[in-house]
């Protein structure tokens, strides 16, 4: 997740304040019916940094592109450009948990004992070899924030102390310099209420039967028809 920062460090040696120079947004949605994950990872750099040497954003991005060349199977990348940041949005579509969990040091999703468990052990040492970057510059790089959000199919029953819960979505906003273990646990969604449907159907059936019986009783109580008078 943080490997591209090494390439970015080479672009920012002339910048004194880097806070807000990057946008890293990792959003996932867990599909509880098929045990697959959908979502996206936005990795983008501020336009002034990419165009620092008079290049176009695309030319400046070429210095970072190689770090994103190896995408996991089941994903695709597209250009991300919101006018302030330029980069790539990587989409994860119907990716089985086994493939999503393939990266040894990446996030993981497990489905066991009726619960979905998301974990991600972040490690600031993954910034890589930045020994050539001035200390003051490195300090600014380490202030860069990133966002991770996971939407579960069921109610969230457990989360770590830095997780923010809204509905069934858990969100973390952290700095790349932080070592933090992300964790959230959600229950399986409640199944279709077949029992309730059965009770309603049974009650409806009883009402229909009662109506038929009542109609039959009313008909049986009617007086017999008077015989028609003889023809003149």
Image: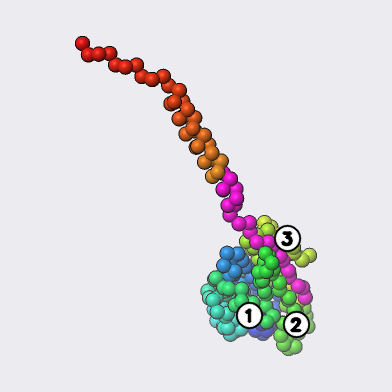
Give the residue pinned by disc 3: 157
How dense is the environment of label 3, judged by Cα within 10 Å: few (below 14), some, or many (20 and up)?
Answer: few
* In-image side of 229 versus 104 (left or right): left
Q: Earlier along the polypeptide chain: callout 2 or callout 3?
A: 2
Residue 11 against residue 148 in the figure, above or below: below
Give the residue pinned by disc 1: 102
Write the start and end of the magenta stretch as one range.
179-200
Q: Position of residue 45 (x, y in %)?
A: 62, 75
Using the rendered view, name the quadrant where residue 3 is placed: bottom right
Residue placed farthest to the top in the image?
232
Give the residue pinned by disc 2: 125
Could you say which disc has been placed on residue 61 in the image?
Answer: none
Disc 3 versus disc 1: distance between alpha carbons? Answer: 26 Å
Q: Of residues 141 and 173, which is closer to you in this image?
A: 173
* In-image side of 204 versus 49 (left or right): left
Which corner quadrant holds the N terminus? Answer: bottom right
Residue 68 seen:
yes
């Amino acid at each position: 997740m943080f490997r591209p920062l090494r390439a970015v460090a080479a672009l920012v040696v002339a910048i004194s304040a880097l806070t807000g120079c990057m946008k890293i947004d990792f959003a996932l949605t867990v599909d509880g019916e098929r045990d697959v994950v959908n979502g996206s990872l936005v990795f983008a750099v501020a336009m002034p940094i990419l165009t620092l040497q008079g290049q176009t954003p695309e030319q400046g991005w070429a210095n970072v592109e190689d770090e994103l060349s190896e995408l996991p199977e089941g994903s695709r990348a597209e250009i991300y450009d919101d006018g302030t940041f330029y980069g790539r949005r990587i989409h994860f579509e119907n990716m089985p948990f086994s493939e999503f969990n393939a990266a040894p040091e990446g996030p993981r999703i497990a489905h066991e004992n009726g619960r979905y468990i998301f974990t991600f052990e972040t490690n600031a040492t993954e910034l890589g070899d930045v020994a050539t970057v001035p200390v003051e510059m490195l300090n600014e790089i380490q202030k860069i924030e990133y966002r991770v959000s996971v939407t579960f199919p069921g109610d969230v029953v457990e989360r770590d102390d830095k997780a923010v819960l809204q509905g069934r979505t858990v969100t973390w906003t952290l700095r790349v310099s932080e070592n933090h273990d992300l964790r959230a646990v959600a229950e399986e969604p409640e199944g279709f209420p077949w029992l309730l449907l059965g009770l309603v159907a049974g009650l409806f059936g009883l009402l229909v039967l009662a109506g038929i019986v009542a109609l039959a009783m009313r008909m049986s109580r009617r007086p017999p028809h008077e015989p028609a008078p003889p023809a003149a």
